[in-house]
Structure formats: structure tokens, C-alpha cells
Image: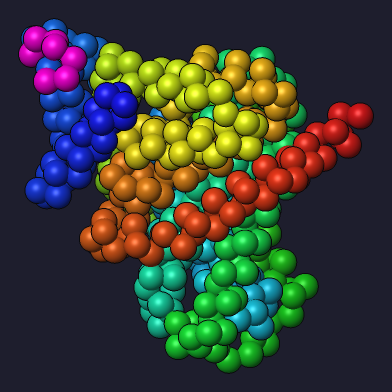
Amino acid sequence: METIFIALGVVGLIFLVLGLGTWVFAGLAVVALGSLTLLGDFSLDRAGLILSRILFRAGSSWELSAIPLFIFMGELIFRSDISERLFRGLEPWTNRIPGGILHTNVFGCALFAAVSGSSAATTATIGKITTTELARRGYDRNLSVGSLAGAGSLGLLIPPSIVMIVYGVQAEVSISQLFMAGVLPGLLIALLYSGYLVTAAIRQPDKAPREAAVKLSRLHSLKLLAPVFVLILLVMGSIYSGIATPSEAAAVGVAAALVLLLLERQLTWTLFRDALKATVLSSTMVCSILVAAALLSTAMGYLHLPRELASYIASLELSPAMLLVALALFYILLGLFLDGISITVMSLPITLPIILQAGFDPLWFGIFLVIMVELGQITPPVGFNLFVLQGLTGERIGRVALSAFPFFLLMCAAAALICAFPAIALWLPQQLMG
């Protein structure tokens, strides 16, 4: 129980520091340093040396390079008329559905998730395109921000996914099968989100105003969406053909976006310069939070919190159903103050043997774990999607978190469905791999 109280104390300290208005990067770094010195009995010099090394290592991570590149691709799309085509192209498919173009948050994130592999990049890119347009058209701010926070997390579940790669290497599970296993659960969550938007729009029509009928045919709308589909095909094709890693594929996406704009005679020096400036601001915000999370993750590792919490769960000798409930709570707790990769790396040496001993399929557990990590993306105090949206919209972090809460519950419902019906995750890999 002492470990649980320490974990709660760390979470409370994060709330306190961020509640004082401290920058997120600085706040997380202060909590990491304070945790090591106050709870870990480290000297200030030694703690500072440890964190400085982690700061350099996390800041020079190759995986981080995908984030500014995907954001740059989004900025180029946003500043060209491709973003307007995205709305015009999706409108014929969403206009007659209650909720209207709110569904473009869900559909847009699901599409971009198939390119980025990053929740933060998906949220930032689609958010750049949709938040302004939804506000201009009078859609409810809470539904707009909340649906984007929830749908942005699909960047971890719909392949390619960096967290899946980390899990596959550690658990010795086929990464290609993990990618296949993530498709149907990702679509299930997207459908749950759209269903919630439909229900909210029917119950309170003022939240999603009815728009005039769209004269554009669905066939013509596909032509408008063609540039986005081309980008997706190029990026996905470069990954699945083995030509490029996800980070390298981000560069492929940027190059393809630049070529598209050149062919359409939209690429100007002003557009390129403004997109580059905005990319520096957005990617600095996102990457600084990720680096600060690495500092906090290191501090938690030195305090042995993830390992001790997992060992405590193992000592309870629970039934399979109760074990999944306990693990879900455990991962949600870790998601309050750790990033997804750190959660996976730190906890898996303990949780995977427990799962295998209980008779669960490690392929299925990989999808369950990714969904748990996704939940951490939209839970304060260190939900990355929340901070990305705070930077994009200027809303207070508390309001962003409240807006995202219904989508947190929907993701919990999806996790429960996948526990009750494991075939949702396992059917596609079984069919494709024979």
C-alpha cells in the first residue's frame, strides 16, 4: 500500500505544480527532480546528472523526428486548399448524419492515424485543420475539442504504431500481426465516437447545427479527397513495402505534400515559410512535453513504482476477469504520469508473465495494452493530447479534460468489448495469416 500512496503523492504533486501555472515542460521536470531527491533519497547533484543524461537521450531520439515532419505535412495541407477540400470532400458523407462535420474529427484522425503512428502528431495535424473550421460554423466547442482528443489517440492503435513495435519486440510477437490486430479495434472505437456524436446531436440539436444540403456528389468528393488518399498510400506503401521506417515515411509524406502543392501551383515562399514557423512552434510544444515525460518516467523507474505496483497486483492471485480489471486500473494509473512507450517498457517484464500464466493470448494483450495507453493520452495531468489541444485552442486544460471525458468512457467500453469478444482483435490476423 505504501507504493500506491507514493504514486498518488506524485500525481498530486504534478497537479499542484501545473495548477500554479508552471509551463508543462518545466513542471514535469521539477516533479521528476523532486521525486528523486525527496522520495528516492538521491542527492541533488546526482539526480540532476541522471536527468540531464535522460534529457539529452530523449531529445535526440530518432522516433521524435516523425512528429515535426508529420506536423509540417499537416501545416502544408492546412495552408493550401487541400484542407478545404478535406471538408468539402467529407461533407457529402457526413452532412446527412446527425452531428454533421463533427464526424470529420473522427474520420480525419482515423485516416491520418494510418499514416503517422503517433497520437500527438495525429491530434496536432487534424486539429490544425478542423478546430478553426468547426468554430467558424458554430459547432459546440466541447464536442469539437473532446472528439478530437479522443479520435487523436487512434494514432497509437491504427497501424503503423510505435507502441506496437515496442511491444512486439519485448513480447516476441509478430509486429505485422499486431498491426493487423489493431485495425478492427481502431474502427470499433471510431464507430463508438461517431455514434456518440450522433446521439449528442439528436438530443441537443443546437450543438451541431444543421447545414444546407451539399450539392457536391459523392463521386466528385472522392476527387477532392484524392490528395489526402495519395499521401496515405505513399506513406503506408513506403512502410509496408519495407522501403522506409515510420520516421522515414514521415519524410516521404512531406516530400509528397510539397510535390502535390508544386503540381497544383500552390507552393509559394510565404506558404512554405509560414508552415515552417508554425511547425517549429507546434513541434517544440509537443516534443518538449515528450522529453519532460521521459524525465518523469526515469524518476518513476528509479523509485521502482511501475514494478512494485505490478508485483502487488500479481500477489493478489485474482481470477482472469478480475486480473484484467486490476491491470486496467494499473495501466490507467500509470497513464496519469507516464508516456506510452515508458509504460510498455517498464511494466511488461512483470505483467506479460502474469498474462501468459492466466492463459491470455499475447497478441490480444498487445491490443488491450495499446488501448490502455490510449486512455492515458486523454487523462490529466500528463495526457499529451490534452496539452496539444490546449496549445491549439487556447482553452484551459481542465475544460479540455472535461470535454474529453465522454470519449474516455467510450474507449473504456471498447476495451470491455474486446475483453468480452477477443475475436475483435484476433479475427483479422487469423484470417490473413492463415
Asked which quadrant contains residue 149, the reply is bottom left
Q: How is the image coloured?
A: rainbow
- Looking at the picture, tell me which residue is in the foreground, 199 or 277: 199
Q: Residue at x 38, y 70 (%)?
A: 142
Front in this rendered view, residue 353 or 89:
353
| Quadrant for the C terminus in the image | top right
Look at the image and say whether residue 59 sits in the magenta stretch.
Answer: no
Residue 258 drawn at (x, y percent)? 52, 47
Q: Position of residue 269 (x, y in %)?
A: 37, 52
Left or right: 141 as drawn, with respect to 414: left
Q: Position of residue 13 (x, y in %)?
A: 17, 37
Q: How many marks?
A: 0
Looking at this view, name the residue that lies furthest to the right: 434
Left or right of residue 29: residue 336: right
Does the segment drawn in magenta span residue 43? yes
In this rendering, is residue 386 above or below 86?
above
What residue do we see at 68% from left, 74% from top?
93
Residue 425, image quadrant: top right
Q: Residue at x 62, y 62 (%)?
A: 192
Name the residue located 51 percent from the left edge and 16 percent from the top edge: 350
Residue 328 vs residue 53, the one in the foreground: 328
**Quadrant showing the N terminus:** top left
Vertical placement of 335 versus 44: above or below? below
The answer to whether residue 291 of the structure is visible from this angle is no
Q: Residue furthest bottom?
A: 212
Residue 266 in the image: above or below residue 115 = below
Is residue 299 at all visible to an observer of this figure?
yes
Q: Is residue 200 left or right of residue 361?
A: left
Q: Is residue 146 depicted above or below 75 in this figure?
A: below
Percent coordinates x, y for residue 376 in the rendering: 42, 42
Give the extent of the magenta segment. 38-44
